[in-house]
Image (cartoon, grey):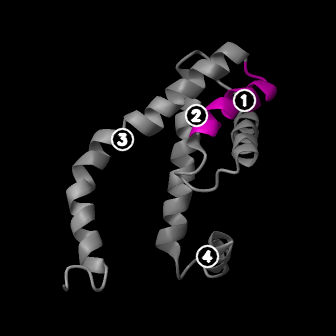
């Protein structure tokens, strides 16, 4: 419930929190592009509205509202929701696995390289850490 409260606060004053709102919009636009690219890799160019409907329905069924929640379930549900929106099932399954490769494995080297910086920033921002 805290996440709902925080999201409401962000969207109540979007100009004040434009970086966070822009980051979320960029994240979801990139997710949609990755789904489209995964399906296009297997020759399917879905109608944009049908693709958004299938992707968002998958999000609702998995209750995936943040980048890390429900990712495994999403891989199982997304082909079915995209198939129900008009894609052939085989293409929906293959496209979903391509999407997961684009969103999970492709950014992994960049995430691993950034770990030392993130750990350092985390230690600097936590009060009381290392004061012993």
For the residues labelled 2 and 1, the Cα–Cα distance comes to: 10 Å
For the residues labelled 2 and 4, the Cα–Cα distance comes to: 27 Å
Q: Quadrant of residue 80?
A: top right
Badge 3 or badge 1: first in the primary sequence: 1
Residue 1 magenta-highlighted: no
Which residue in the structure is indicated by mark 2? 35
Magenta segment range?
72-87
Q: What residue appears at the point 26 percent right and 55 percent down from the top-left corner? A: 115
In the image, residue 107 above or below residue 6? above
Depth check, front residue: 91 or 109: 109
- Relative side of 125 to 104, left or right: left
Residue 81 magenta-highlighted: yes
Which residue in the structure is indicated by mark 3? 107
- Relative side of 117 to 30, left or right: left
Badge 2 or badge 4: first in the primary sequence: 4
User: Which marked residue is nearer to the observer: mark 2 or mark 4?
Assistant: 4
Q: Helix, strand or loop at disc 2? A: helix
Depth check, front residue: 129 or 20: 129
Q: Quadrant of residue 128?
A: bottom left
Q: What residue appears at the point 63 percent right and 72 percent down from the top-left corner? A: 7
Q: Helix, strand or loop at disc 1? A: helix
Q: Quadrant of residue 76?
A: top right
């Amino acid at each position: 419930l805290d996440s709902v409260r925080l999201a409401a606060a962000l969207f109540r004053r979007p100009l004040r929190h434009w970086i966070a709102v822009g980051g979320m919009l960029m994240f979801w636009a990139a997710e949609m592009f990755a789904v489209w690219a995964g399906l296009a890799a297997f020759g399917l160019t879905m109608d944009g509205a049908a693709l958004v409907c299938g992707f968002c329905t998958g999000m609702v069924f998995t209750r995936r509202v943040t980048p890390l929640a429900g990712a495994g379930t999403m891989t199982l549900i997304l082909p079915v929701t995209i198939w129900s929106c008009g894609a052939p099932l085989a293409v929906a399954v293959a496209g979903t696995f391509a999407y997961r490769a684009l969103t999970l494995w492709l950014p992994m080297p960049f995430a691993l390289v950034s770990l030392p910086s993130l750990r350092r920033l985390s230690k600097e921002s936590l009060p009381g850490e290392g004061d012993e």
